[in-house]
Image (spheres, grey):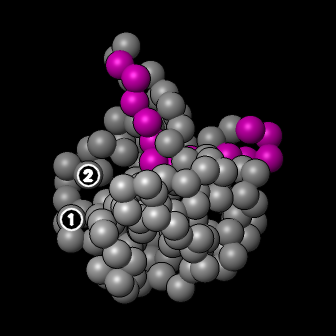
Amino acid sequence: MRSVNEMPVLNLPTAQLRIRRDANGRAEVLDILRRRYVRLTPEEWVRQHFVHFLMHHKGYPAGLLGNEVSLRLNDTARRCDSVVFGRDGAPLMIIEYKAPHVSLTQKVFEQIWRYNIVLRTPWLIVTNGLTHICCHLDIDAGTHEFVSSIPDYATL
């Protein structure tokens, strides 16, 4: 993405992002969780706004959020876009981001479900910044329900 002005307005509160240009003139955004600048893509635009939303509007502690969290699935290295952890260090939620122009299809859910085979979290979220789909799972009972809003951290 060449310019922040090209980024779409999202269905999220405005976030105060730190953006700069790299040596080649490409936009980069500060990822406050990884503590480094990363290339500003439409998906990264969504990630950074959503992380700020969780922290500043839903009470998620920055120290319990991780971006690009590695895991092994069938002897293959994978990365979850974001993972939310409990105060005990156990994973509570996986979040998958897509660019705003990407539809949230069954294929997107299959990706996050595969990650959850390993992490076994009770919460899954997929978002393209315009639509947010949140699912609560009871892993022991093998049931799930879609909920209409993103929970506050205190209710996880």
Pick whichever, 42 or 77, lies toward us. 42
Q: Amino acid type of disc 1?
A: Val
Q: Quadrant of the N terminus?
A: bottom left
Q: Nearer the viewer, mark 2 or mark 1?
A: 1
- Residue at the spot of label 2: 108
Q: Is residue 145 above or below residue 81?
A: below
When asked about the image quadrant of residue 31, the answer is bottom right
Q: Which residues are magenta?
A: 76-89
Q: Residue at x 41, y 84 (%)?
A: 11
Pick whichever, 113 or 4, lies toward us. 4
**Is residue 6 something that shows in the picture?**
yes
Q: Residue at x 48, y 53 (%)?
A: 38
- Kindly state the secondary structure of the residue where label 1 is placed: loop
Q: Is residue 47 above or below residue 107?
A: below
Mark 2 surroundings within 10 Å by alpha-carbon count, few (fewer than 14), some (14 through 19), many (20 or more):
some
The answer to whether 3 appears left or right of 92 in the picture is left
User: Is the residue under label 1 in contact with that under label 2 (CB below 8 Å)?
Assistant: yes
Is residue 59 on the magenta stretch? no
Q: Amino acid type of disc 2?
A: Val
